[in-house]
Image (spheres, grey):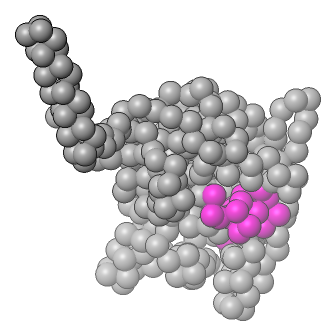
Amino acid sequence: MEKGMMDLKIKQERHCKISRESMEPKVKVKRIFKVKRSKITDDFLAAGALSNGCCPMNGTKFPMVRAMDEDDECDNRKAIDVNFQKEILITPPKDSEVSVTQPMRSLTVEEYAKAFKSFLDHSTEHQCMDQFNEKELPSIIASLGNGKPTINVLGVGSGTGEQDLKMIRVIQANHPGTFIENEIIEPNPQHILSYKEAVRNSSDLKNVSFTWHQLTSMEYEEQAKEQNVQKKFDFIHLIQMLYRVEDIASTIKFFHSCLDSQAKLLIIILSGNSGWALIWKKYRHCLPATDSGHYITADDIKVVLEEMGVKYHVYEFPSAWDITECFIDGDTIGGHTLDFLTGTKDFMNTAPWDLKQRLRHALGQPECSTKEDGRIIFRNDLSMIVVESKY
């Protein structure tokens, strides 16, 4: 009987304990590291970014990845593209790994040179200029010097001098026996060294002197004004360099004022009908804020020249750039292509996924590119603008 009473007492205590537990409030625990599928229609994996972690290797901060509550999806998506330097929400493709990316930044001078070399290797830009030198330049420079024994030439932003030397040879061929004084404005010391090496290796450059000014075009202009000395030239060329000057109109006006009588100013720049023009005008929202260059074409230059009231003539030449690899993630050439297009270091790996996809979509549009034998060819057409001196 005592055993029965003991069992009954234990059952009663268990019943009271369970009743008390059912009356106590339960604590809800939120799991933040379990990744779950969201309701995104394309079955992508949604991930949020929190900036409260540090790299165990070097102590630098990096975003910790957590699962995103479905109720937060709408608000978090608004963070996309607001500011590349701030925390952003990325939507990587299905089955891709969520990774931490570095902030987007502009190319350094050395990085730009590397991307530009890749551009030249996969485009017909220099071949396009060669066609101009062969077909049009001889008649343009025929009257240079006006019978003087010396022709003064100025190259602005000449780089390594490849195109300069080709034009010097054209002038030589059309003005045999005439001495040529060639001056160069180029701020990059490595480019100047390469230019000088090219001159040393060119045995056919007879009766030509070379003077290099390691200055930007603006510094050269300021120096000329400070010294109150403005040398006159018979032929001045600005080849693909106006994108990065501070004041485009002022630069053109200054160098036009440096022309002697019957002299010519040659400006080579992207055509208003090129793929670049359409990207810059119609698809500018696809480009990052890290590109420090000016989005200008021949159409913009013509506006300046019209306001100056000078005579000019425009020669249009087609040019092409194979950009196929920029559509392939992880491709080295494709990475250089996107870097040059955007002026951004490692755009392929640092740009938000959706921005990269928008840019690729724009590049593939018929007005920007054509498809030839399975390759995607970007329209890199150039305009050669020849401006007459005022007298």
What residue is at 74 percent from the left and 49 percent from the top?
361
Q: Which of 273 and 151 is in front in this view?
A: 273
| The quarter of the displayed image where residue 249 is located | bottom right
| The quarter of the displayed image where residue 321 is located | top right
Q: Give the range drawn in magenta.
A: 265-286
- Is residue 287 visible in the rendered image? The answer is yes
Q: In this view, does 207 lie to the left or right of 301?
A: left
Q: In this view, does 69 lie to the left or right of 125?
A: left
- Quarter of the image with the C terminus is bottom right
Q: Is residue 66 left or right of residue 173?
A: left
Q: Which of 10 and 308 is in front in this view?
A: 10
In the image, residue 273 lies at what x, y percent? 82, 63
Residue 284 magenta: yes
Q: How many marks?
A: 0
What residue is at 53 percent from the left and 42 percent from the top?
46
- Quarter of the image with the N terminus is top left
Name the residue at the left extreme.
Answer: 2
Vertical placement of residue 64 versus 131, above or below: above
Q: In this view, does 134 lie to the left or right of 252?
A: right
Residue 146 magenta: no
Vertical placement of residue 357 versus 285, above or below: above
What residue is at 50 percent from the left and 27 percent from the top?
97
In the image, residue 375 lies at what x, y percent? 83, 32
What residue is at 91 percent from the left and 29 percent from the top?
373
In the image, residue 293 lies at what x, y percent? 52, 62
- Is residue 140 visible in the rendered image? The answer is no
Name the residue at the right extreme.
Answer: 373
Vertical placement of residue 227 versus 275, above or below: below
